[in-house]
Image (cartoon, rainbow, N blue to C red):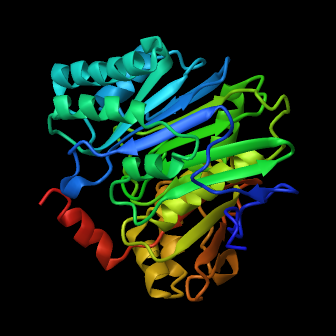
Amino acid sequence: MGVPFLRSRWVEAPDGVEDLDPAQLAPGFRASGVACGLKAGGATDVGIVACDAPEVRSAMALTANAAAAAPVRLCRDQTDAAGIRAVAVNSGNANASTGEQGMRDAEAMRDAAADALDLEPATVAVGETGVIGVQLDVEALLAGVRDAAGALSETGAADFTTAIMTTDRGPKQCALRAGGVTVSAQAKGAGMIEPGFATMLCFVQTDAVLEDPDAALRGALADSMERITVDGQMSTNDMVVLQASGGSGAPLPDGLLDAILLQLALEIVADGEGATRVGRVEAREARDPDEAERVARAIANSPLVKTALFGRDPNWGRIAQAAGMALAGEELQELGAQDIGTELGSDVPEAELSVALARGDSRAHVYFSDLTYDYVRINAEYTT
């Protein structure tokens, strides 16, 4: 048997989880991925996930970036978040900062998918990812959407995952069964990662019965994708969609969605452009949860801490500096080695860091990637 999907030291897997072929979707769903020319070399760049079940209950979360891309604004303003039957996605072009034409193109993409699938436009969500500020080749995209609609398959998740990738080094996907229900999920993300809400694309399908999909999604995101950073940069495009058909007649097992989203979030961090290690930093003994999170994020986003993680340099003083910076202007006890725990100097691929502030009893954690030479190379050459 291969390596289980739920494998991180920080993921608590429910009992009885069975790994399925990740190309498989939850019963009642189909997916596809095709090439339309948005990415060079004939790479797969347009995908669709659709629910064929009689009923669907869904939830959606979108980036909070004030410069949100056209597909995000379209979904926010015109999509029935509780009744999403299909999602059409492209990579290679973010359709962000593209003005009124960009909005018309996003609408055309949605309408093409709705027409091909015989759905109401409000039940189709649109996601796009790639370079910002470049107009779409919309005719090629619409042809790709129609092709993707005709290629839908119950085992099309792998093609769909490939279609949404940009700088990802590999696919992020799973299909798991537990408690009589199946959950399949596909995600992309490697750079421009700092939640506020989400900074990635992620799509989850299940045949479980979900009474409140929005509460289930928000609860699972709070301790997973809302707790990660690669570079402290909030994307203009990203979204998470959860669709539930209820076809199994069984509820979602406790902790299963949380575990899946945390594992996917950690895979995004581990794939942080050029990353080689993942860290988990916890700020303890803070005055309140907001203070704890502010300190944890300051440490996780510190280039000095991130490079120490990369170089396996046990320099705990960098953690003290970042914590103090987050609380600039306030009184903080002098932090010493006794207040800071670190695996910076170890060879573990998932390293634990912590700082005790001695200001209260609140705590918060953030997962982050190291900062390597390749991050600079990838982002210095992103459009050239």
Residue at image coords 41%, 18%: 114
The image quadrant that residue 83 belongs to is: top right
Residue at image coords 84%, 28%: 249
- Residue 244 placement, left or right of 377: right
Q: Nearer the viewer, residue 38 or 349?
A: 38
The image quadrant that residue 311 belongs to is: bottom left
The image quadrant that residue 208 belongs to is: top right
Count of numbered tags: 0
Name the spot of residue 13 as percent of width and height, x first.
79, 58
Name the spot of residue 337 as percent of width and height, x first.
64, 83
Residue 77 visible in the picture: yes
Residue at image coords 58%, 79%: 349
Q: Is residue 47 above or below residue 117?
A: below
Q: Nearer the viewer, residue 361 or 190?
A: 190
Residue 68 visible in the picture: no
Q: Is residue 53 above or below residue 36?
A: above
Q: Is residue 40 above or below residue 4?
A: above
Name the spot of residue 155 as percent of width and height, x first.
56, 47
Which quadrant would the N terminus be assigned to in this image? bottom right
Name the spot of residue 143 as percent of width and height, x first.
25, 31
Q: Nearer the viewer, residue 130 or 363?
A: 130
- Residue 55 placement, left or right of 116: right
Q: Residue furthest left?
A: 384
Which quadrant would the C terminus be assigned to in this image? bottom left
